[in-house]
Amino acid sequence: MNIRIDQKNGSKVAIIESSEILIRNVQDALDLMASINHIHDSNKIIIRQSNITEEFFELKTRLAGDILQKYVNYHTKLAVLGNFEVYNSKSLKDFIYECNKGEQFFFLEDEQSAIQVLHSLH
């Protein structure tokens, strides 16, 4: 795993690059968040869809909700990069739409958009 930091006006965004699945469960997500916060002093994270278990994108597993709730509790913003059109679930599409309207979680296609959105948040 490689972590790059994009810094702008006091805002730090941690960009995770890995060829492995890094988040398989809530504890993995917490460990990643804590590590990035401690080592890089950042509460804004960009991770790729391919680094998260597919169960995350099956809302009935509740994994996405559980992880996102932990990130809310610890004031951590998250952008997931990927192609979410591959999923046919209407509830997942609605979930992604609602997340993208907020200020906590984002599902975006490209890194530059994610960096801009996360830097714009307090």
Image (spheres, rainbow, N blue to C red):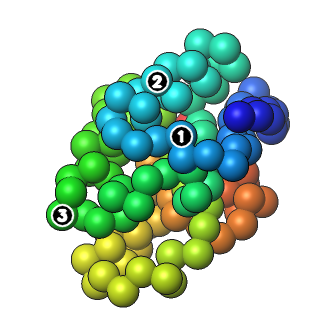
Q: Position of residue 95 (x, y in %)?
A: 32, 69
Q: Which residue is drawn at 33% across and 58% down?
A: 55
What is the secondary structure assignment of the residue under circle 2?
A: helix
Residue highlighted by disc 3: 60
In the image, what residue type sits under mark 1? Answer: Leu
Residue highlighted by disc 2: 31
What is the secondary structure assignment of the residue under circle 3?
A: helix
Residue highlighted by disc 1: 22
Q: In which quarter of the image is residue 49?
A: bottom right
Tell me whether the residue at label 2 lies in contact with that at label 3, contact meaning CB atoms closer than 8 angstroms.
no
Q: Which residue is drawn at 43% across and 53% down?
A: 53
Q: In which quarter of the image is residue 36?
A: top right
In the image, what residue type sits under mark 3? Answer: Lys
In the image, what residue type sits under mark 2? Answer: Asp
| Alpha carbon separation for disc pair 2 and 1 | 10 Å
| Alpha carbon separation for disc pair 2 and 3 | 23 Å
Mark closer to the chain start, 2 or 3: 2
Q: Image quadrant for the C terminus?
A: top right
60 to 27, vertically: above or below: below
Q: Position of residue 110 (x, y in %)?
A: 72, 66
- Give the foreground label among 3 and 1: 1
Q: Which residue is drawn at 58% across and 75% down?
A: 83
Q: Position of residue 111 (x, y in %)?
A: 74, 59
Tell me whether the residue at label 2 lies in contact with that at label 1, contact meaning CB atoms closer than 8 angstroms.
no
Camera sees residue 79: no
